[in-house]
Amino acid sequence: MQPILEMRHIHKRFPGVLASDDVSINLFPGEILAIIGENGAGKSTLMNILFGLYQPDEGQILIKGEPVKILNPSQAITKGIGMVHQHFMLVNPFTVAENIVLGAEPRQGVFLNIDYARRSVSEVSQRYGLKVKPDAKIEDLPVGVQQRVEILKILYRGAEIIVLDEPTAVLTPQEIKELYTIMQNLTAQGKSIVFITHKLNEVMATSHRVTVMRRGRVIGTVATKDTTPAELANMMVGRQVLLQVEKTPAVVGDTILAIEGLVAKDLSGERVLDGISLDIRAGEILGIAGVEGNGQTELVEVLTGLRRATSGTVRLNGADITNLATREIRERKVGHIPEDRQKRGLELDFTVQENLVFGFHYQRPFSAHGLLNLAVIKRHAERLIAEFDIRTPHSETPARSLSGGNQQKIIIARELYQEPDLLIAAQPSRGVDIGAIEFIHRRLVEHRDSGKAVLLISPELSEVVSLSDRVAVIYEGQIMGVVASNAVTEEQLGLMMAGIKSEHLHIAAQRSTADGR
Amino acid sequence: MADKTRTSSERLELLVPLGAIALGLLVGAVIIALMGENPLRAYMALFMGAFGNFNRLLGTLTRATPIIVTGLAVALPFRAGLFNIGVEGQMLMGALAAAVVGSNFSGLPMVVHLPLAMLAAALGGALWALIPAWLKARRGIHEVINTIMMNFIANAVLAYLVVEVLRQPGEMIPKTPPVLATAQLARFSDFLPGITARLNVGFVIALLVAVAVYYLLWRTTIGYEIRAVGLNARAAAYAGINVPRQIMLVMVLSGVLAGLAGAERILGFDRTLALGFSPGFGFEGIAVALLGRNHPLGVVLAALLFGALSSGGVWLSFTTDIPADVVVVLQAIIIFFVAADQIVRAVILPKKKGAA
């Protein structure tokens, strides 16, 4: 069978980096090809070349056997290539139908023919089994449905080759299942899908073949049914990886953090934290599971003094720290790995050494009498760079030019160096490669083993369950229950994440079995 | 590799302003030619006017002095992400305070009177900056709007006070009583023979202020926090930096610098406050900061260039039929090219175009 898409011997060089080094892939009609690799392996570069955002230095792209030149995204679209980006490109106040036809609007004179648009949207959505309401506004829709709109948008433009760039990062487990179904439907209708991810279980669940990339090269392409997650992981990182976190049972001590009845509101007065009570003890990792946007961000912000609590108390080592300034909370030994390292955790245009004292820059020995001690800051940085294996040319390189994993290591090195009594780790492994994830997990467990408390927030269930000693599930600003991580199934957690309290769990479980019959 | 990108981006920091100046002079030459004059002769006259003899050179430095300081007053808050358009008004308030203190308190020794007048100027500028700073930090009102409005108010307040209150009886020209000898910044002409330029100790102070701003930004904890706020305020808040307080602080410091710029004019250059003494030094400071890429050294160099153009312009209109206003056109074109740095990049780095 002739491949619908071939990319042959693609070379792409950026200053100092060979982002694509003789990369060849092919995609057959009706196939799901997964491309996996660590961050910086060259997946995005390859897709950006396919989508016309970059031009390859060497190599050839063939569609249905015909060599093509793709100079820009609109050429890619006319050649039947559609891309769903990780961050949606939707106009929030517009309706579904308006978004789908945007850029290719059916017109009646100078006016938008909205009836025609609505009809064609319904038609496309029925043909591919993608249920959406054409008149719903994007901002009212859950993320999973927004993604469906993105897919419809490219189908509406006649895409034959669909590129999904890390599509599951923003979805709930249920929505991920629905996406898998959508992908199967699309391939059943003859569409071909390139599925970019770094999650092995997703590859195993959906794809027909897998291409593994590492450092700009294709390591190999294998049929999914002939491989195992462990084998793929090895191909990705080039060495054996422990997917399971090794840890001894927790030896818990005194309560470090006691949260009681915590309430916080957003600008419109909505309760984003709705009476949260939690205890975290020394020597344990408490994980907070939940779909993103259920109050995790706000909880961390209140705990770290970045958002005001309207009622409730937060006690650290017995002392009331509710609504203290961020600096005071930090000085009481609270470390914080923020969920968005680029927007919060780092000054990207500061050097690595400046970032490694960020938040402690005013303390001795880094500063004295209001003056920075640059020599000490540099020595400190060089020590942490070695200890945490931060890959940087030197300590005065801007943090911006480091890879995501190494940027995250800067934050972790900085926050752990202070040996905080409480470490708040929000999505510590988001967007970093497997090698770095393993490193980060090991550091968090070590921190717990040294008798400190760790609050872990992550939307990835497997990460929360494997790292935490206890798991609290958050839903719409409330804690649905706190359970021991070794006494709960992913299904039970999934139900709690959907808003069912732990004490009602057995009922819910029974009902779902009844439905199954 | 990162090393290479860093040095090349640093080189670009220098190349873009230089390219903008070159392009500005080129376009200016075309305009002068269209006016039916010889561009080479015009530029020669400009150069001679600015650097032709020792006194003219000093004249250039004199003209550059206030805009070195106002340029720094714009560049400093810019590092914190704030655009202080109100340097002009803050400078006027500083000048007012310097004039009032400088013309009163007779009998004070110089070691007390002069620093007191300088301090008053700094305070005047700081207070005028404090209002928009507070509005910005605590109420989120945009500083560009605030500071522009404060300029108008400063102008009106100054005009009223000088005309109605401070003017000496019988004096026709709206100006304050002369600054007493004990509050004057010494002019070099006071002790060096043959100097006609009114260059004064304020020039040296301006250079010291530039060094101080550099030191503040890159060697002190406060400067670290100012830069952190400017580059990423969310990250700064995360790191425990009190962002509103830094905004207040940097705006007030900017006001201090603006006030000092006024002090140099009143205590050193004019030795009185005459209405209209400033042709817009505060606004020229914005251009100077832009051309100098908000770096203290760049600001000094840019101020010297603008000072040279302004003082050369006088000679230009003396010796040719070209109006001195051509200088303003030149300055505007240069700033245009600095702002539209993509044009400059495209011209000076033509090979890079394909790679990007």
Image (cartoon, helix red, strand yellow):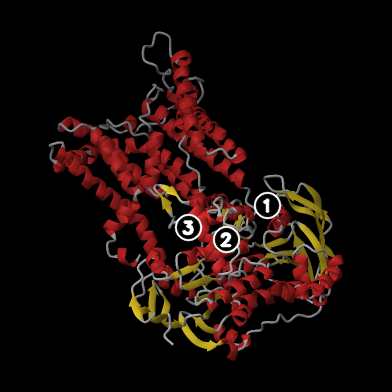
Q: Are marks 2 and 3 on the same chain?
A: yes
Query: Which residue is tagged 3?
Result: A101
The answer to whether residue A286 is seen in the rendering is no
Compare marks 3 and 1 and give the one earlier in the sequence: 3
Local SS, label 2: loop
Quote the CA–CA distance across marks 1 and 2: 16 Å
Of all chains, the one bearing label 2 is A
The quadrant the C terminus of chain A occupies is bottom right
Q: Where residue B297 sits: x, y (%)? A: 39, 49
Q: Residue at x 53, y 70 (%)?
A: A165
Q: Nearer the viewer, mark 2 or mark 3?
A: 3
Q: Tell me the crowding category of disc 3: few under 14, some 14 to 19, or many 20 or more residues within 10 angstroms, Cα based.
A: many
Q: Kindly identify the residue that appears in the image at 15 percent across and 40 percent down.
A: B33
Q: Quadrant of residue A358?
A: bottom right
The residue that appears at 44% across and 69% down in the rendered structure is B2
Mark toward the viewer: 1 or 2:
1
Q: Estimate the x, y position of residue B191 in percent, counting from the top left.
A: 33, 32
Residue identifier under label 2: A346
Report whether B147 appears left or right of A280. Answer: left
Is residue B129 rendered to the left or right of residue B272?
right
Q: Label 1's element? A: loop
| Res. B336 mark | none
The label number, if any, that marks residue A306 in the structure image: 1
Q: Is there one chain holding both mark 1 and mark 2?
A: yes
Q: Nearer the viewer, residue B336 or B331?
A: B336
Tell which of A232 and A436 is nearer to you: A232
User: Circle 3 sits in a helix, a strand or a loop, which is it?
Assistant: helix
- Labels 3, 1: one chain: yes
> Which amino acid, by three-letter code, is at mark 2?
Leu
